[in-house]
């Protein structure tokens, strides 16, 4: 329990956040649960891999908040450059993430994520502008071109076509999910590189789970407009007009409708596990971003 100094008033919000950060520091020191994804530790850095994509030979990782240099509230492997963290810490964290997968940080291609369904085709030789182009999905068929995106409750989507050797990443919050960023990524892989949806391995990564993602009436109405069958997507939250939304299932259904047959759902809730992941909602908006990084290798 947080206690203020004698005769010194502490604002209620400040006291609440002090208790929260004290609990978070304690959580970061604990060992974590074992989910369905492959959990890998390299020294003090921790990341996860999708089993199907890894078995197919894709080099990738969904990184946690562990193993970086950032201080609270960004502790410690924050790769988000726009959240208020020190730029030198963000760069050092990006370099650590890149080193684990044996890529150069300077070669990473990313996007300015804006909750859209826009897909960017990345090719070797493209210059990475700063700020990067606005998009919420990246695809490439070039080996040695690492792609990265950032998350803190929104859904990381991974795409890998081992037949045509095409890689894709996407960022799907409720806006991106409703806009169809997942199917748009599949469609762009088909149009740009000749992928067949049935060949694509998809992963739905750690993100806020259906027990904690409460949305308001407007979002709930948008979801009802998108899906004919609402079973398992929305359930009442107890507040008038509000509901809990299952982003995992929404994205799974949309990918399946796009023809993707191999879909792995991590089932890891970032809200429940701030010991390993950043959660914008659980941490009241003041937190970092964890990274997803992937690269095609020569020879598949």
Image (cartoon, helix red, strand yellow):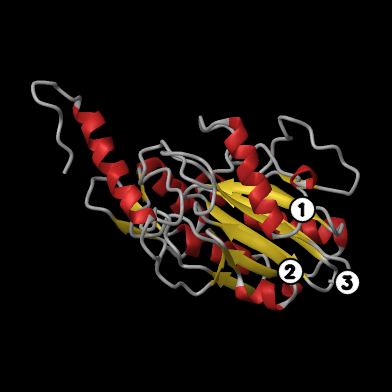
Q: Earlier in the sequence, mark 1 or mark 3?
A: 1
Q: Going by the picture, which residue comes out furthest to the front?
A: 43
Instruction: Characterize the local packing of mark 2: few (<14), some (14-19) or many (20 or more) Cα atoms within 10 angstroms.
Output: many
Give the side of residue 192 with respect to residue 8, left or right.
right
First in sequence: mark 2 vs mark 3: 2
Disc 2, disc 1: CB below 8 Å? no
Question: Element under label 2?
Answer: loop
Where does residue 64 sit, x and y in percent of width and height?
A: 52, 55
Please, is residue 138 above or below residue 143 in the view? above
Between 147 and 196, the one lying in front of the other is 147
Image quadrant for the N terminus?
Answer: top left
Q: Which mark is residue 282?
A: none
Residue at the (60%, 38%) spot, across then down:
90
- Work out whether 16 lies above or below 94: above
Please give left or right for residue 84 compared with residue 15 in the image: right
Q: Which residue is mark 1?
A: 146
* Residue 58 disc label: 2
Q: How busy is the neighbourhood of tag 3: few (under 14 within 10 Å), some, or many (20 plus)?
A: few
Which residue does the image show at 51% across and 33% down from the upper left?
83
Q: Quadrant of the C terminus?
A: bottom right
Q: Position of residue 284 (x, y in %)?
A: 35, 38
**Whether residue 171 can be seen here:** yes
Residue 195 drawn above or below residue 6: below
Sort mark 1 into few (<14), some (14-19) or many (20+) by Cα contacts within 10 Å. many
> Which is nearer the N-term, disc 2 or disc 1?
2
Residue 276 lies, with reference to residue 55, above or below; the image says above
Mark 3, residue position = 299
Question: Residue 38: x percent and y percent?
Answer: 56, 73
- Point out residue 296 in the picture as x, y percentages from the top left corner: 80, 62
Question: Image quadrant of residue 196?
Answer: bottom right
- Comparing 184 with 87, the one in front is 87
């Amino acid at each position: 329990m947080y206690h203020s100094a004698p005769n010194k008033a502490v604002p209620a919000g400040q006291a609440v956040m002090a208790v929260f950060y004290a609990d978070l520091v304690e959580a970061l020191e604990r060992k974590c649960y074992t989910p369905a994804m492959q959990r890998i530790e390299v020294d003090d850095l921790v990341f996860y891999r999708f089993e199907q994509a890894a078995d197919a030979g894709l080099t990738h990782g969904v990184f946690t908040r562990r193993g970086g240099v950032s201080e609270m509230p960004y502790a410690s492997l924050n790769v988000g450059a726009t959240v208020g963290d020190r730029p030198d810490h963000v760069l050092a964290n990006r370099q650590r993430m890149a080193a684990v997968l044996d890529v150069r940080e300077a070669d990473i291609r990313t996007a300015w994520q804006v909750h859209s369904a826009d897909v960017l085709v990345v090719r070797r030789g493209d210059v990475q502008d700063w700020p990067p182009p606005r998009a919420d999905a990246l695809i490439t068929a070039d080996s040695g071109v690492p792609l990265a995106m950032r998350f803190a409750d929104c859904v990381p989507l991974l795409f890998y076509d081992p037949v045509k050797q095409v890689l894709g990443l996407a960022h799907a919050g409720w806006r991106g999910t409703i806009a169809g960023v997942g199917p748009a990524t599949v469609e762009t892989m088909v149009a740009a590189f000749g992928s067949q949806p049935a060949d694509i391995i998809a992963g739905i990564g750690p993100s806020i789970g259906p027990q904690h993602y409460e949305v308001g009436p407007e979002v709930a109405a948008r979801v009802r407009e998108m899906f004919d069958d609402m079973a398992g997507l929305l359930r009442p939250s107890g507040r008038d007009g509000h509901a809990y939304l299952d982003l995992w299932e929404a994205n799974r259904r949309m990918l399946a409708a796009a023809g993707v047959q191999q879909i792995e759902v991590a089932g890891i809730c970032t809200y429940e596990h701030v010991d390993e992941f950043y959660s914008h909602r659980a941490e009241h908006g003041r937190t970092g971003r964890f990274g997803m990084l992937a690269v095609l290798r020569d020879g598949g």
